[in-house]
Image (cartoon, grey):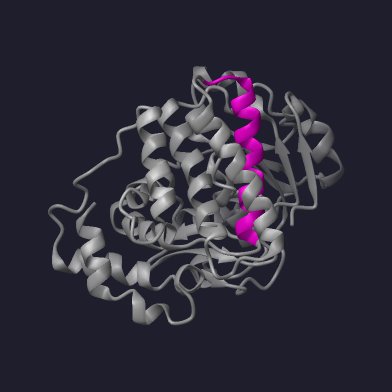
Amino acid sequence: MVDFVVYGRGSFDQLDEIITPHRKPSLPMVFLVDHFFANENGKWLTDRIPAKNNDRIIFANVTLEPKTSYVDKLAADLKAEFGSVSGIVGIGGGSTMDLAKAVSLMMNNEGSSADYQGWDLVKKPGVYKVGIPTLSGTGAEVSRTCVLTGPTKKLGMNSDFTPFDQIVLDPTLTSNAPHNQRFYTGMDCYIHCIESLEGTYLNEFSKSYGEKALELCRKVFVQKNEWDDECDDQLMMASYAGGMSIAYSQVGVAHAVSYGLSYLLGTKHGIGNCIVMNHLEDYYPAAVKEFKQMVEKNQIEIPVGLCANLSEEQFDTMINVSIGMKPLWENALGKDWEKIITRSKLRALFEKF
């Protein structure tokens, strides 16, 4: 679990006070910021970053989801220039959160981040790391993974060393998020709560958090007729609680399949989950019905035709990535999942996208 959590409107302005005890002489604090804020429109946020002396603000390119090669380059560049750093502060959406966690780990672990894609492969704690989400829904601020696209697979660095040491949850930072992006990340939370609550790994800890997160998602996307400050507050807490739920259980079919889409086509995580969830009536019938109602109410258009012109080799690549997510399939379908989900079934599912 994350050791320290600060929540509240305006809490971002406590950042200097929060990180000061963790500064080390001559070693910079690195602020890894979503490139969405790298212009005049983002100055309302970047001008408030408490950078001092030799601190660095690095605008992270998260147009695509983070790759192991990008993590390795960022860590190598920082090591070459400074030897080490006081800490990494990630400010942005889920991809930026994952990037910050991964770079922190690679400051203290040898080799490539691709070497640590899997479960409990990380050997050493990373440097001090702080997560500050500017989008709500992914749960990346509290999860024990940082999902990366590597040379052969899309898979997280899942370990007890991965979670942030500190998170700052300030709902005002999400108020300028584009409508579509806000919906897609919110649906990521909704979907992974459904997968957790209907999975075989479910336990009372994950159930308690998952039920609360699902309740908050429904308040925002089903009951509300227009967006207001309360929606930002509720969705940020839904993201936190949803992330806690899957940290103690697991996600399921939508995530396993969307990883294949993302690996091959670069589909962003939230959109990918929505594309897949739209066709999962066989696995989550009630939730898919509710999901489609939310899509219609919020006037969202789910992309179609992504797989229309793919080759056999490309289909095989997506299937290989998806079917490799064994814990996700076991959570969704039980220990005999390999008898239930076949390559032909996956192929037929991908053809719908």
Residue at image location 22% in from the left, 49% down from the top: 306
Residue 41 placed where, x, y %?
Answer: 50, 18
Left or right, residue 305 beside residue 107: left
Residue at image location 43% in from the left, 58% down from the top: 255
Q: Is residue 240 magenta?
A: yes
Left or right, residue 116 beside residue 150: right
Left or right, residue 222 beside residue 166: left
Asked whether 114 or 76 is in front, the reply is 114
Magenta-highlighted residues: 227-247
Residue 25 is at least partly visible in this image: no
Residue 253 placed where, x, y %?
Answer: 41, 62
Residue 310 placed where, x, y %?
Answer: 15, 58
Residue at image location 84% in from the left, 33% down from the top: 17
Residue 332 versus residue 191 in the image, above or below:
below
Which residue occupies the extreme front position in the image?
286
Asked whether 309 or 164 is in front, the reply is 309
Total labels: the figure holds 0
Asked whether 288 or 233 is in front, the reply is 288
Residue at image location 18% in from the left, 68% down from the top: 313
Dominant SS of magenta comes to: helix
Asked whether 258 or 331 is in front, the reply is 331
Q: Is residue 156 magenta?
A: no
